[in-house]
Image (spheres, rainbow, N blue to C red):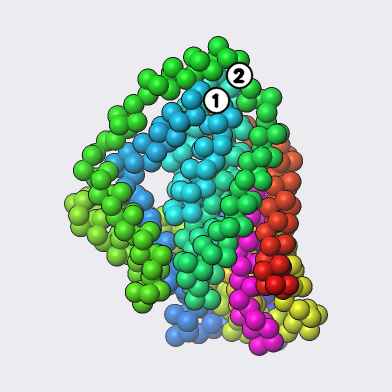
């Protein structure tokens, strides 16, 4: 007779294979896997609430509502045009400024939402400059993944880690913010060097580009001035509450839902239209995945793996390096969300023999930055490359890989070294 643990592993691997294959939507794959687990009583029905992390799901839902409501005001197009005008006709400056804007925006909004909003504007700016948008788009992808790694709400893996480990918004800023700032500066320097010839324009060309940008009016991008002001006010309020949520005794998910309800109430937007834009497949994907991974916990599989790792890891420094690099390399190949969901209970079980606090930062570092390695490593990568393809710009897997793997090894190398110094040496 096949044991529950073997069934749990088989269902997990099958679900993972479906997610990687992508011929079946990943939400359907996760829900199918969860259905098999519950049908076979690997995870009893009454225990499902223990494994579905509502903190992650409601935080994502709240931020989706805020972003979808604010989008109608033209807020994000306003930011893009304003940034382009600051570049004064220099393609290199556009790359650097947009990278900074993308990173900062991705730190406080979902990075997929950020690239969805900014990519069309980058394509337009490149067409005005009459140069290839490839460097801008590549830089945007890397910046979104780096910026998203800096905060609790910037990238789904961080939301999951923060909820599971009880980490605050400020802890993410303090522990990962400086690392991501260093990584961003280094990556921008690398890209400036790699694409310096492509981004070069003559003085006459630059003067013409500068005049074109001067004619753009960012205020014309504002479609609803009232909603624009309300969106800015609520987003500022939510970000402020994220910084003090632990002092207020509020969970991050509750902060996001409070902000969403305030903006909906204040703006009088049609909630049906806003709710239709929520990425429900992503939320159902999370729910199903939590149950599939929960089966590994329920059957003791995660505990067994954790025991093996603990026996062979003799210090926190070793654990930091192993988790960071394993998560990074794996995230370049598979989706970082199921990977994070799998490693969270593993790290929790390692808490029996060592302090897991630095290991959470190692997991976040690897899972978020590993996505830069390949064209399919993170959702933001897939979205940007898809938009580029619809605009007759092909970014091949190999072309991306050449730059992406270099960025992965440099950024994870810097980040893991800083974590090792902070927690294993100092």
Q: CA distance from mark 2 to mark 1?
A: 8 Å
* Quarter assignment of residue 108: bottom left
* Quarter assignment of residue 421: bottom right
Secondary structure, mark 1, is loop
Question: Image point 43% across, 22% down: which residue?
Answer: 213
The image position of residue 377, as x and y in percent, is 64, 51
Q: Is residue 375 above or below residue 308?
A: above
- Name the outermost residue toward the top: 204
Which residue position is annotated with label 1? 90
Which residue position is annotated with label 2? 201
Q: Magenta span covers which residues?
A: 348-375
Q: Residues within 10 Å of mark 2 (few under 14, many from 20)?
A: some
Q: Residues within 10 Å of mark 1 (few under 14, many from 20)?
A: many
The label number, if any, that marks residue 81 in the structure image: none
- Pick the residue in front: 376 or 198: 198
- Pick the residue in front: 57 or 114: 114
Q: Is residue 188 above or below residue 91?
A: below
Q: If the image is split into quadrants, where does the N terminus sit?
A: bottom right
State left or right for residue 159 relative to residue 396. Answer: left
Question: Image point 58% across, 22% down: which residue?
Answer: 131
State left or right for residue 248 relative to residue 364. Answer: left
The image position of residue 419, as x and y in percent, is 67, 66
Secondary structure, mark 2, is loop
The image position of residue 101, as x and y in percent, is 48, 43
How many marks can you see? Answer: 2
> Does label 2 or label 1 sit earlier along the sequence?
1
Question: Image point 34% across, 26% down: which residue?
Answer: 217
Dominant secondary-structure state across the stretch colored magenta: helix
Q: Are marks 2 and 1 in contact (CB under 8 Å)?
A: yes
């Amino acid at each position: 007779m096949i044991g529950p643990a073997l069934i749990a592993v088989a269902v997990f691997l099958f679900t993972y294979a479906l997610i990687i294959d992508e011929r079946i939507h990943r939400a359907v794959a996760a829900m199918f896997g969860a259905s098999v687990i519950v049908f076979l009583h690997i995870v009893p029905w009454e225990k499902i609430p223990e494994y579905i992390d509502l903190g992650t799901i409601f935080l994502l839902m709240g931020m989706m509502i805020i972003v979808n409501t604010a989008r109608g005001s033209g807020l994000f197009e306003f930011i893009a045009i304003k940034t382009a005008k600051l570049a004064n006709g220099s393609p290199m400056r556009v790359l650097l400024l947009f990278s900074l804007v993308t990173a900062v925006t991705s730190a406080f909004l979902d990075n997929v939402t950020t690239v969805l909003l900014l990519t069309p504007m980058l394509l337009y700016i490149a067409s005005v400059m009459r140069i290839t948008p490839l460097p801008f788009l590549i830089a945007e992808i890397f910046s979104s993944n780096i910026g998203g790694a800096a905060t609790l709400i910037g990238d789904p893996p961080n939301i999951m880690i923060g909820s599971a480990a009880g980490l605050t918004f400020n802890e993410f800023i303090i522990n990962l913010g400086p690392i991501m700032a260093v990584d961003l500066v280094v990556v921008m320097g690398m890209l400036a060097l790699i694409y310096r010839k492509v981004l070069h324009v003559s003085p006459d060309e630059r003067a013409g580009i500068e005049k074109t940008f001067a004619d753009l009016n960012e205020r014309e991008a504002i479609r609803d001035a009232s909603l624009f002001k309300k969106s800015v006010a609520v987003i500022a309020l939510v970000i402020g509450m994220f910084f003090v949520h632990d002092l207020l005794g509020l969970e991050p998910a509750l902060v996001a839902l409070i902000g969403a309800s305030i903006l909906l109430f204040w703006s009088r937007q049609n909630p049906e239209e806003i709710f239709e834009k929520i990425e429900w497949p992503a939320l159902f994907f999370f729910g199903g995945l939590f149950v599939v991974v929960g089966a590994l916990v329920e059957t003791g599989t995660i505990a067994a793996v954790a025991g093996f790792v603990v026996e062979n890891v003799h210090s926190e420094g070793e654990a930091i390096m192993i988790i960071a690099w394993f998560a990074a390399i794996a995230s370049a190949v598979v989706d970082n969300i199921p990977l994070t969901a799998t490693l969270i209970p593993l790290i929790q079980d390692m808490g029996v023999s060592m302090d897991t606090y630095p290991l959470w930062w190692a997991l976040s570092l690897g899972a978020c930055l590993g996505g830069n390695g390949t064209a399919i490593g993170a959702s933001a990568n897939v979205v940007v490359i898809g938009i580029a393809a619809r605009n007759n710009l092909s970014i091949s897997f190999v072309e991306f890989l050449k730059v992406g793997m270099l960025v992965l090894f440099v950024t994870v190398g810097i980040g893991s070294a800083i974590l090792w110094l902070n927690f294993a040496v100092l």
